[in-house]
Image (spheres, rainbow, N blue to C red):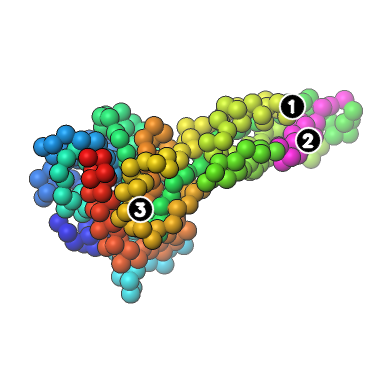
Amino acid sequence: MGDVVGLLERLVAARSPSGEEGPAVAVFEDWAAAAGLTVHARGQNRWVERVAAAPGPTLLLLSHYDTVPATAQWTRPPWTPTHEGDRLYGLGANDAKGCLAAMMVAFAQVRLGRGRVVLCAAAEEETGRNGFETVVGALGPLDAAIVGEPTALELAVAQNGLLVLDCVASGRAGHAARPHLADNAIYTMARDILAVEALDLPLRHPVAGATTHAVTVAQAGERHNVIPGQARWTVDLRTTDAYAPEELTALVQARVASTVHVRSDRFRAVSTPPASAILAAARAARPQAATFSSPTLSDWAHLRDVAAVKWGPGRSEVSHTADEWVELPMVREAVGAYQAAIEAFFAAEG
């Protein structure tokens, strides 16, 4: 049960793009059966728990076994674990099967004197709506969580949210030879885009910093001789707790003539309470770890009312790249770090 590298190899070999996690589910279930654990299921999500005789708080260990699809840029077989020096290559090795394997081994080995530990292997974290957010309500009350994502074993104590706004500029179509008889939606869109570019958001989160915004899509017109009566554009905002998504939507709408529609605001910004027991436990387990704010999304967004840290082996910049890899010494180190943090959490909460 302590062979984290062998477990990681089996997970990597299990092809599991979002929505097709079945082979990885089988690896998780086989591991749980060997450990004598009862597996709970919802969709392709799986979780197990350990409950001590003495009552205490509940700690969640959360990671995911789905991956992005393999691209044509891979020069190695994506689902064949390949060792080169200290690296293990394979799709999902870094994001986030290295984290999941380390959590599984730590979960099985940890000395639990009180309380309850839940380990959840989530599906559809990369894309989809049938992942952890459909499970969290079934796990019972949660007091703290560790979210397994590649952070090079540094501690992410804040994570940006995502707000996507689809905007429509309306005008009146007409012939390009008679522009005075039309109302060019492109010009309205252009003025609105410049207004959003100038939008000042001065409030800052103490760790995550500023909310950022960028216009990422602009579409209008089909023929050179037709003035378009409609133009569509999109704003991508990476949010912090300094502004609520509803407030940001209103700020954009107040500055533009286009109509503004919320495409997505389900990934809210999250941060770790500075005095939380889980942060203290993680620091005790790895005192050399730096704290930082993570710009990338994860299932932490679905734990807004639970004190959590995002923490795991691997490097965020390697995620979603061809020939993805993870450093095996870091994965092995993560097992001990997770185990020490779990034990420190329950000792402090006692």
**Image position, residue 88 (x, y; %):** 32, 66
The kind of residue tagged 1 is Ala
Q: Nearer the viewer, mark 2 or mark 3?
A: 3
Residue at 35% over, 48% down: 280
Q: Earlier in the sequence, mark 2 or mark 3?
A: 2
| Residue at mark 3 | 283
| Residue at mark 2 | 191
Q: Earlier in the sequence, mark 1 or mark 3?
A: 1
| Residue at mark 1 | 257
Q: Mark 2 and mark 1 in contact? Answer it, CB < 8 Å.
A: yes
**Image position, residue 278 (x, y; %):** 33, 44
**Image position, residue 93 (x, y; %):** 34, 58
The kind of secondary structure element at disc 2 is helix
Instruction: Provide the residue span drawn in magenta.
Output: 181-199
Q: Earlier in the sequence, mark 2 or mark 1?
A: 2
Q: How dense is the environment of label 2, judged by Cα within 10 Å: few (below 14), some, or many (20 and up)? A: some
Frontmost residue, 184 versus 135? 135
In 3D space, how far apart are the residues under numbered discs 2 and 3 (Cα atoms)? 49 Å
Q: How dense is the environment of label 3, judged by Cα within 10 Å: few (below 14), some, or many (20 and up)? A: many
**Image position, residue 191 (x, y; %):** 78, 35
In 3D space, how far apart are the residues under numbered discs 1 and 3 (Cα atoms)? 49 Å
The kind of secondary structure element at disc 3 is helix
Q: How dense is the environment of label 1, judged by Cα within 10 Å: few (below 14), some, or many (20 and up)? A: some
Q: Quadrant of residue 190?
A: top right
